[in-house]
Structure formats: structure tokens, C-alpha cells
Amino acid sequence: MSTEHVPSTGAWRIWATTFLVPVLAIVTALVIGAVIIVLTGADVVAAYGGLFTGAIGSPRAIAYTLVEATPYIFGGLAVLIGFRAGLFNIGVEGQIAVGSMCAAIVGAFVTLPPVLHVIVAFLAGAAGGAMWGAIPGWLRARTGAHEVITTIMFNYIAIRGTDYLIKVPFLDQESSSQRTPYIATTAEIPFLFGEAYRLHGGFLIAVAATFVVAWLLQRTIVGFEIRTAGANPDAAHYAGMNVSRTIIITMALSGLMAGMAGAVQVLGLEHNLKASFSAGYGFDSIAIALLAASNPIGVIPAAIFWGALRNGAGLMQLNSGISINLINIIQALVIAFVAADQIVRQIYRIRTARGEGITLSRGWGR
Amino acid sequence: MTPVLEVRNLTKRFPGIVATDAVNFTLEKGEIHALLGENGAGKSTLMNMLYGLYRPDEGHILLNGQEVHIHGANDAIARGMGMVHQHFMLVPTLTVTENIILGNEVIKGVLIDTATAERRIKELATTFGLDIPVNAYVHDLPVGVQQRVEIVKALYRSADVLILDEPTAVLTPQEADDLFVVIKRLKAQGKSIIFISHKLREVLAIADRISVLRRGKLVGSTTPAQANEASLASMMVGRDVVLQVDKAPAQPGSVVLDVAQLNVRDERGNTAVADVSFQLRRGEIVGIAGVQGNGQTELVAAITGLVNATHGQITLDGEAITNQGTNRAIDAGMGHIPEDRHHHGLVLSYSIADNMVLSAYDTPPFARGYIINEQAIAQQADTLVKRFDVRTSSINAAASTLSGGNQQKVVVARELARPLKVLVAAQPTRGLDVGSIEFIHKSIVAARDSGTGVLLVSAELDEILSLSDRILVMFRGQIIAEIAGADADRNRIGLLMAGVRGTGAEA
């Protein structure tokens, strides 16, 4: 065999091949979405025009889109870190719940000087998520219990557990709604352009986290261990790596990102924690990671796209009478096309990449 | 006379490679025609086309002078072709009779007529001199007997053309001799046989005609009378080949690896290694001979820390490493060329450079603290690619883009790049081309000469004989004999590999 298949090392070529399928998946989903709009008798131009204007039509629309994107960036990173180690963390939802709870408690019930307070509250949220991720990791490493099962179960515990904490011990007695008290102003992550634009510092933390994760995975020995455990766990074992430890570290890092998502939502945006607040961030994060093609930097555009769809949906409905549920259909189609990438490759006649490939999750036990 | 089977200009292309390129090949009635070639030369592709598993892109297949298009294995069987695969297609939990009639049952009412089937099988067995216990369960049978079952299975389906794919790969030399007797009897009864192999000695011993494939092309045909091992090897490789490994006598030093009373269980919990004890000295190569599946894999796994032993001690240069894991073994100075490079030895999606530091990624200069030093890794890769002659256009190419021989060179280079006290080389040249084999053998001898103790495990007796300074024979989990490399007698080791003792001088 010759070596003629050596991939080009040009950076843009790699990026193009990595993100070609996700971009085409989005295009295809939007086209099918347009067909659905036509079939329901509505005006495609009005609908997509509304979606577009609502998402990025004005500085405020853009700011709102970025606000929506912020938890998805963290969540997408959380799922992605797991993917890179061959682990499927479905527990991001629960880890966000624990993270937001910890941040809300430290923000509202602990008194600390400015700056320090927000840092401690943020770290408490991150640590809560990390802990909630590390436990299923530990179970996987020690007993072989599959993380897909345990993280789903931990979601229930986290979601019901935080629900109880919000409604009983940490309930704001002054308020008519079921939520925790407002956090102290010292614990707030500041807004970047004033409250009207809602865009808060959490977005910047998310972008920074993306680059830290990219660096961690690519340039550190922990990242090398994570990637090797994902690409070939037998080779990792052979090479003297501690695969069990890597699994625990990976799940903790994954939970850490999820915990940050919960923390910035509470400290930057909501300033309190309402009962059943997360509602699906964790599950959409799986979609973000898939759309990002398991490349950390790809998480940012994927999350912004997701946020834009969510943010633009309202104006789309207003302009065209199309239900915002269409957005769910488009999102589902995007995921279907990214997950079943062979369909996209067939439609657009793209040659299957050689050698590469990410193990999303391995079989049971092992 | 019309040949039984004729292939004209048969071409099969796969993306990026021409697997067989206008191959012409004939098989006469009652002929044993050997097809010789290195791994990847196109032998399997050719046979898979004959057996209907691949459809040729160009060319014709003629059976008894009639052009045929073969659609799948069932069609091939119906047309009188039988194939004995290298990996047997038998159901271990069924009896010999059940395996043979599987998919071809004689029915009486709603029941399978086992009695009639058994009678037919016994007739076939007698006619062709194939001794098989019809009522035994396949998993109880030695490999050589299982192979006879496969042959009877083909004959039961009225095969006239038998394709034997690397039939001796899993056999002891004695079992191979028995097989040759069977093959000659099949020939005498008018069957035509295609014998696929890369072993020169066998091909010369059994074939009437020998055709050599190289890189998809048929480079020539000859007969055993006209050829010898050297001429066949150079046909196979395309240049002159040194078949003998050049090495000076060993200068064994102090004991560097001490294995005492080692017991290891296999994945199913059965004892695979039983009370194995031996010592390896600096500057010597100890070869472990044995038929595959006699505990060598588990022995290597325990020594290198991949699995835990149930009992016993492993000491590397005075340091106890028993059940301490792979990292401890590596730190203590052990290198390991694993028997399956895809499974353990490489991360195929990683670059050559990353694979070159797979077991040293966390030590200086490749890591500074917790940070990876990509420059040092690239430098290391550049050096090793040159030193070990890895054929690639870039150290950043994925390991999956390399040929098998070059992949194995990456593994060998990585392991020999560290200062080693002990090198465990398991099947270091399996499936490689002759050029790579020569190179890897030289590297192993060079490691020995620099004072490393080498434990060589190989299923190829020739490899053991040409490299080892001492030979241990492993049979059913035990070491049953120790022989000095200089006194090694092929025949005697062969008998020991089959568990036949009592030839004197055993351990």
C-alpha cells in the first residue's frame, strides 16, 4: 500500500473537512423545514425572515442569542470531553442542576466581600457539577457500571433533589413563586452592556473555557490520556496509562463544565434558582457536541446557532404564524443528519474520511 | 485437456489500490497448485473472487471450460468449489457430524437423518484417509483434527476444487506433515487443490506447480524441481533476500528477568499458564516456541503487566513487578512489542509522531510538567522514522495510512527508543513482508547485542530457530523443555510443540 492518502496538513483543510458535514446538515434541515412551512400553507420568507431578524437582526437580538448560547457552550464542552474519552455523559442535565444549586446557595446565603463572593459562588457551582459527574465516573471505573445508565439515574436524583431544596429548605418565603432568594449583588456576574442587553460575563467565561478545554485536550498529558482512552483503551492500558483514573478525571471535568453552565445562569442571568429551571439544556448539549464534530472550538458556533434558533423562534411565530415547535423539528433534523452523517455524505457525495472517527460510546461494561 | 479452473485477466480494484491486476491462473485436474505471496499480495482477493465473495472488475472465470459468474459462497459450493479458511468456520459446541451437515442436512420427515449423514461422512473419511471422530464435539478436538473436519465438510458438499488458505498457520510441523499426506491422497483421488501459503519450505514440499503473486500481479510460475527457497523468496519480494539472520554468539550477562511459579488465568477463568518459571539474562534472546493458544498470550500479558497473575513472581532486575500494572513494568525498563499491533500497539487515528511516544508521553523531554512538548515529539519522530526506515510522507500522517510492515516498524521503533532492560517481542513479524521481517529481526538482534534481554514469542518456528539463543517450548500452559539454540532440532521441537515428550533432555 502506498502512502498517498496522507491528509493535507493545511489547517483550513482540516477545518473544512471537520465542519463540512455539520454545515450541510444544517442547510439540509433548513431546506426540509422550508418544505414543512410551505406544506402548512405559511410564507417561508416571512418565517425564515422572522427567524433571522429575531436571532441576529439587531444588536440586542445578537446579544440575546449569545445569552441563549452561553449554557450550550458549557454543556456542549461537557458532553464533548466525555466523547473524547469514549464516554457518553447523559448526566449534564443533572450536573447543571447541582451546579446551579450550589451557586445559588453560596450566592444567597454566604456573605463575602465583592469579587471574592462571585468567584467562590462560581467555583462552588463548578465543583458541585464536577462532583456529580465524578461519581458515575468512579462507578464506571471501579465496577464497570455503564455511565449511560448511571448518569440518567443521577439526573433524576439531581433534578428531584434540587427541586426539593428549592421548594423546602432554600425557598424564598417573601416570594409568591417557587424559587430561592436573590443572590447578593456581590455574587452577581456583571452584565457586559447593561441589563437591557442581558449579555453577561458568563459568555466570556464560556468562550475562555472553550479554549482552555481545547488546550487541555491537545497539549497536556491529561488530554493525551483522555484522547487515547477514547481512541483505543487497550492501547492506553498497554502504554501504561491508568485508564480507570482517566475515566474518573474525564467525568469530573465533564461535570465541571456542566456545573459552570448552571453557575453562570444563576449568577449572571437569573440571580436566583427557580424550580425546574434547566429544562433540557443538558440534553441539547449532546446535540451541540455532535454538531461541533467533537472539536472544542466548534462548540462556539454550534451553541450560537442553537441559541439563534431559540432566540429567533419568537419573531418567526409572530411574523408567519408558524409554531415555534418548528424550531424543535429543525433542531431534530440537524441532529439526525449529523448523527447519521452517511446520509449527508450520500446527498452531497462526500468521500468518507479515512482513519478518523470518534467513538461516541463503547459497549456495556468491559 | 481443459483445466478444471481457469482465470483470465482477473482484475479487482479497491479505492486507491489494484488488489489483483490482470491475473491469469489455471488449475488442472488432479493438480496441487500453490499460490505464493506476501501478505497483501492479492492472494485472498483472488480466492474471494473465485469463491464469489467479491465480484471481479474485469476478467473471466472458467470452470471446466465454461465461463461462470459466481454469486456468493453457496453458488461456489454448488459449482464444486470448497474452501478451508485459515480461521475455521466450525461451531465448537456441535459435534463433528452436526458441523459437517450444517446447512446441508438430510431430512427424514421432520427430523434430521443423522445416521445416514454419519454413514456418508465415514465413507468419505475412509476414501480419503481422513481420520475424524464423527461424534466428538469440535471444541474437544486438536486444531489439526478440526482442519480435517473442514476438509470433510467441503468433500461432503461434493467439492472437486479445494482451496486451502494458509492451512499450516495453526499447525505443528508434524500436523502439517499429516496434512500433506491428506492433500496428496486427495490429489490421487482426482481432486484439484489450490494451496495458499507464504511459507517457502511447504510450497516446495507439496506443490506440483507454484505461482507467485506480488503486489496484485502474477510474477511467474515455476515447479519445485526448478525452484529453491532463495529463488522463490526473490520472486516474492522482487529482489534478493537474505534468509538467514546474521548474528554473533550471545554473550549472556546477569539475570535480568526472573519469572517464578507463574500462574495466569485466561479471560474465561481457565488456567492458561501453569507454574511457569524461567530466567532471562542480559544479552540473550530466549525464544518461546509453541502452537498458538498454549498460554503464550497470557504469559506475555502477565509479564508486561496487562493482566494479573493468580500466583507467582515476576522480578525485573531485582524489582518485583508482579501484578503492578503496565506503567510499573515500563518504568522498570520493559519494552513490549505486542502480538496485535492494532489492538494494543497503536492508536490508528493518531499521527505517527504521537504513536512514537505512546508509552513515554509523560516523561521528559516529551512532557514538561503536565504540558506536552510537541517539538520534542516531532524531533523524536523524525529521528525514529529515519532510523527505522518507516516509509511515510509525513510524521503527522495517521498510523492507519501506513502499511502493516511500516506500522509494525513504528511499534518497534517506539519500544526500542527507550533504554530497555528487557524486550518482550510477541509475534513481532506476523503478517509482514519479507523486507520488514529482515529489518525487525536485525533490530531485535541489535537490542540483544546492546545488553537487553529479549523474550521472543512466536508461532513461526523458523523465526524462533533463527533468532533464539535458548528455546523454551510451551505446551498447554507449561514449559516442557529447554533447548540451547545451537542444538535446536526442528523435528524435535516440533514433537515437543505437539506435547510429545520422552525424547530426552527436557526441563
Image (cartoon, helix red, strand yellow):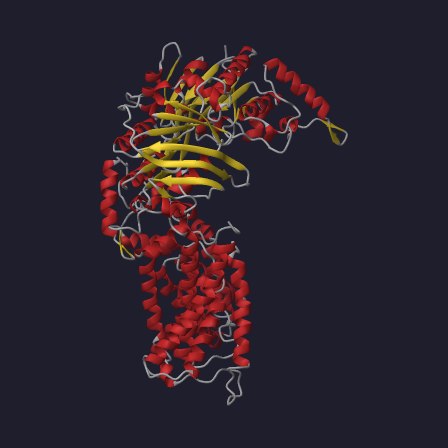
Q: Quadrant of residue B22?
A: top left
Position of residue B414 in the picture relative to residue B176 (left or right):
left
B107 or B284, nearer to the observer: B284
Where A280 sits versus B209, above or below? below
Q: Is residue A291 visible?
A: no
- Which residue: 46% across, 64% down? A133
Q: Position of residue B212 (x, y in %)?
A: 38, 20
Position of residue A237 in the picture relative to residue B449 (left or right):
right
A358 or B425, nearer to the observer: B425
Q: Position of residue B334 (x, y in %)?
A: 34, 41
Q: Position of residue B322 (x, y in %)?
A: 42, 43
Marker count (numbered) = 0
Q: Position of residue B411 (x, y in %)?
A: 33, 39
Q: Residue furthest bottom?
A: A174
B127 or B421, nearer to the observer: B421
Which quadrant of the figure contains the C terminus of chain B? top left
A351 or B131, nearer to the observer: B131
Q: Quadrant of residue B241?
A: top left
Q: Is residue B474 visible?
A: yes
Where B98 sits versus A221, above or below? above
